[in-house]
Image (tube, rainbow, N blue to C red):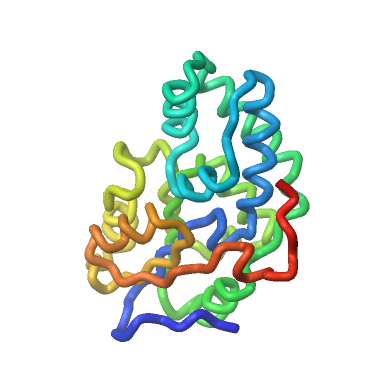
Amino acid sequence: MMLPLPEGEFDAYLFDCDGTIADSMPIHYLAWQRALSEYGAKFGEELFYAWGGRTPASVIVDLNEQQGLAMPVDLVNERREQFFQELLPDVQAVPEVLEHILSAYGKLPFAVVSGSSRESVTASLNALGLLDRFDVMVCAGDYLNGKPDPECFLAAAALLGVAPERCVVFEDTDFGMRAAAAAGMAAVRVPPPWQRHPSEVSSA
């Protein structure tokens, strides 16, 4: 079922990727578990979803601080990405968001605005056959301040040449929704996997 849009008229759609376009959060969680287990770090599923939308580097830094570890940020992030790429063939699109992409494609410009790397986002969209649908990609490394700061969404709007108040954001995380609000943009909240697939039991 297509997710309802907020009231108003919009000139651009801005999409988060993981958990919004791609039903990839469970895969990301498995990749995190494999990468962190090499250093004895813990990352519970509840915290993983609570921190959704943050850049991987900031997550590793905070886990180090919380758990008294000294994990090498770049190396752990590379391992996490490696594991994610191995699991990627299993990824599916979020049907309720895919409907909006297919319905509005060619009528409005689209941007992907993600806390993940450009490599990761590109691989996910390629796996789904959707990469060519997006006019702009704003990913980790393209901005200084991650969600909930509005910088990434404002950068995407500027690249599209659309005023922030004329953009609607599709997001699945609290950080993302806060970033959209701070950017002055309307937003559609994408339900998490356990609400979209209530009959499935978490494997974590």
Q: List the single residue furthest toward the top.
A: 70
Q: Residue at x 66, y 51 (%)?
A: 26
Q: Nearer the viewer, residue 183 or 125?
A: 183
Taking the image as shown, residue 60 lies to the left or right of residue 177, namely: right
Q: Residue at x 49, y 22 (%)?
A: 67
Q: Nearer the viewer, residue 91 or 45?
A: 45
Could you say where residue 166 lies in the image, as x and y percent from the top left?
27, 73
Could you say where residue 2 lies in the image, as x and y percent from the top left?
55, 82
Could you say where residue 155 lies in the image, as x and y percent from the top left?
29, 52
Q: How many marks?
A: 0
Occupied quadrant, residue 144 = top left
Against 124, residue 9 (above or below) is below
Q: Nearer the viewer, residue 58 or 85?
A: 58
Against 64, residue 177 (above or below) is below
Could you say where residue 193 lies in the image, as x and y percent from the top left?
62, 63
Q: Residue at x 43, y 43 (%)?
A: 54
Q: Residue at x 59, y 72 (%)?
A: 98
Taking the image as shown, residue 168 lies to the left or right of residue 56, namely: left
Q: Quadrant of the N terminus?
A: bottom right
